[in-house]
Amino acid sequence: MLSEARQSKIVNLVNENRSMTIQMLMKELDTSESTIRRDLNELDAQGRIEKVYGGAIAKDITFSRRDESVNFRKEQNKDSKIAIAKYAASLINDDDFVYLDAGTTTELMIPFITAKNATFVTNGFSHARKLSEAGFLTYILGGEIKFPTEAVVGEEAILTLFKYHFTKGFWGSNGVTPSGGFSTPDVKEALVKQMSMNRTRERYVLCDATKFSQISCVTFADFSDATVITSSLGDDSQGYRSYNNVIEVKD
């Protein structure tokens, strides 16, 4: 295939799927990794796609490389987050063993939880305090403290997760795309999210509509691995409402 035709196909694939990894492009085009990397560099320089670590994303997708502080994120889209949190909390039953990921929306769930006999494990130290104050039996993972997200991360946290089997779990995500999955900027936090998801039967990702068509540096789960609870999708130009695993909660 001539380079011009190959590059046009790459652009079409990236725009159609919103993001593509190098491995996916190699398979689709039956082309070597070095050729794909060269094409992505050229297409990025031309402004036709945006080259990111491990692949490329469409130009209209936002790419985030760092976490904002918790205090900043708490005030963003607060009404939407409260609606999402209230719905998510209603899914918890008395006999559930729940993993609660660090994050502003998961933290907002706590005042709405009515299942007083549920047990919780979390890597959010503010979550642990609030859950305990509310009278819930609560365990917190050990490990390294990541200040911007008030999360416990690292190898010790991952090793602790091996002994647990959760009935339900709730996570936050910086970015959501069908092809790029659920993503976050930090590798250590992504690994804790990934391991806790692997130990959970029913998985829910909580994110307001602004997180769709965004992608961060590290994918911690495929789009099909969890049910997404989100706020109003508006005109939904990207068609997220059509996916069976997306629950839209009205603000």
Image (cartoon, rainbow, N blue to C red):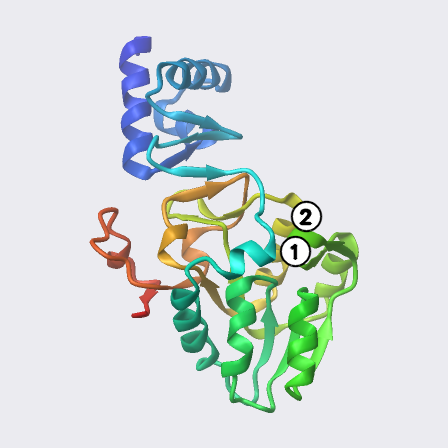
Q: Quadrant of residue 103?
A: bottom right
Q: Which mark is residue 192?
A: 1
Query: Do the CB atoms of the residues marked 2 and 1 lie less than 8 Å apart?
Result: yes
**Where's residue 22, x and y in %?**
46, 28
Give how far across and how far down residue 222 sits, in percent: 46, 51
Is 12 drawn above or below residue 138 in the view shown?
above
Amino acid beneath label 1 = Val
Mark 1 closeness class: few <14, some 14–19, many ≥20 residues within 10 Å? many
Position of the C terminus, as image quadrant, is bottom left
User: As drawn, is 126 to the left or to the right of 235?
Assistant: right
The one nearer the camera, 4 or 79, is 79
- Left or right side of 49 for 67: right
For the residues marked 2 and 1, what is the alpha-carbon distance in whole angstroms? 7 Å
Q: Circle 1 sits in a helix, a strand or a loop, which is it?
A: helix
Residue at point 60% right, 91% down?
117
How many C-alpha atoms fall within 10 Å of the one at disc 2: few (<14), some, or many (≥20)?
Answer: some
Q: Quadrant of the N terminus?
A: top left
Residue 64 picture location, percent across and down: 50, 39
Residue 217 is left or right of residue 47, and the answer is right
Which residue is identified by label 2? 188
Residue 51 percent coordinates (x, y): 45, 25
